[in-house]
């Protein structure tokens, strides 16, 4: 039986630190708990993120910069789902997290929700934002 199960985000091109900074600044209650970096003798560029832990809504997320280039990135089928306190929070998070990214569903009322948005950020990570 697994002892720990957590979401794992593997970034490419040294984008992990920028993502950590953005998420900690924009997502209410988010906190970077620890960051370990590659050294001069590591398989990735010195100073890039070897392993970091980010708390998002009480969930621990592990983050890394891949030392190996891959032919894949993130897919919308994996997303963070945030229950927002207000419709205005949905709009604000969609605007700030979605800056430089894409929009699968712009903020709106979709019948299943009073206010919902589904965006991808500049790193390709998907976020579903919901109120009501």
Image (cartoon, rainbow, N blue to C red):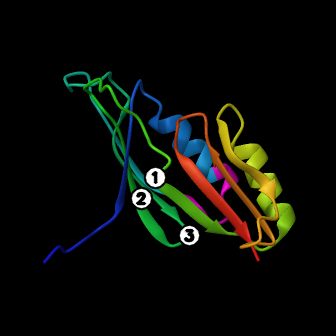
Q: Which residue is labeled 1 in the image?
A: 77
Q: Is residue 62 left or right of residue 27?
A: left
Between marks 3 and 2, how big is the CA–CA gap?
Answer: 10 Å
Task: Please identify, in this view, whether the residue under mark 1 or under mark 3 is nearer the observer.
Answer: 1
Residue 117: assigned label: none
In this picture, residue 69 sits left or right of residue 48: left
Question: Mark 3 — residue?
Answer: 57
Q: Earlier in the sequence, mark 1 or mark 3?
A: 3
> Do residues under tags 3 and 2 come within 8 Å of each other at their CB atoms?
no
Q: Residue at x 54, y 40 (%)?
A: 19
Q: Quadrant of the C terminus?
A: bottom right
Q: Residues within 10 Å of mark 1 (few under 14, many from 20)?
A: few
How far apart are the alpha carbons under marks 1 and 2?
17 Å
Name the foreground residue: 125 vs 6.
125
Q: Image point 30% across, 32% down: which residue?
A: 66
Q: Position of residue 76 (x, y in %)?
A: 50, 47
Residue 18 vertical placement versus 25 (above, below)? above
Q: Nearer the viewer, mark 1 or mark 2?
A: 1
- Measured in 3D between alpha carbons, the distance from the residue under mark 1 to the one under mark 3, in whole angstroms, is 20 Å
Residues in magenta?
25-31
Instruction: Name the residue at 82% across, 55% down.
Output: 91
| Residue that appears at 13% across and 78% down | 1
Specify few, some or many for label 3: CA neighbours under 10 Å numbering under 14, 14-19, or 20 or more. some
Q: Position of residue 32 (x, y in %)?
A: 50, 55
Circle on res. 61: 2
């Amino acid at each position: 039986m697994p002892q720990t199960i957590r979401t794992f985000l593997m970034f490419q091109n040294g984008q992990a630190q920028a993502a950590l900074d953005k998420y900690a600044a924009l997502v209410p209650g988010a906190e970077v708990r620890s960051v370990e970096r590659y050294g001069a003798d590591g398989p990735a560029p010195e100073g890039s993120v070897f392993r970091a832990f980010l708390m998002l809504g009480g969930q621990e997320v592990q983050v890394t910069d891949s030392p190996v280039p891959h032919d894949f990135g993130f897919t919308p089928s994996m997303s963070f789902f945030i229950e927002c306190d207000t419709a205005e929070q949905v709009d604000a998070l969609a605007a700030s997290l979605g800056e430089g990214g894409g929009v699968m569903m712009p903020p709106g009322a979709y019948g299943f929700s009073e206010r919902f948005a589904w965006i991808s950020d500049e790193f390709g990570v998907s976020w579903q934002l919901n109120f009501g």
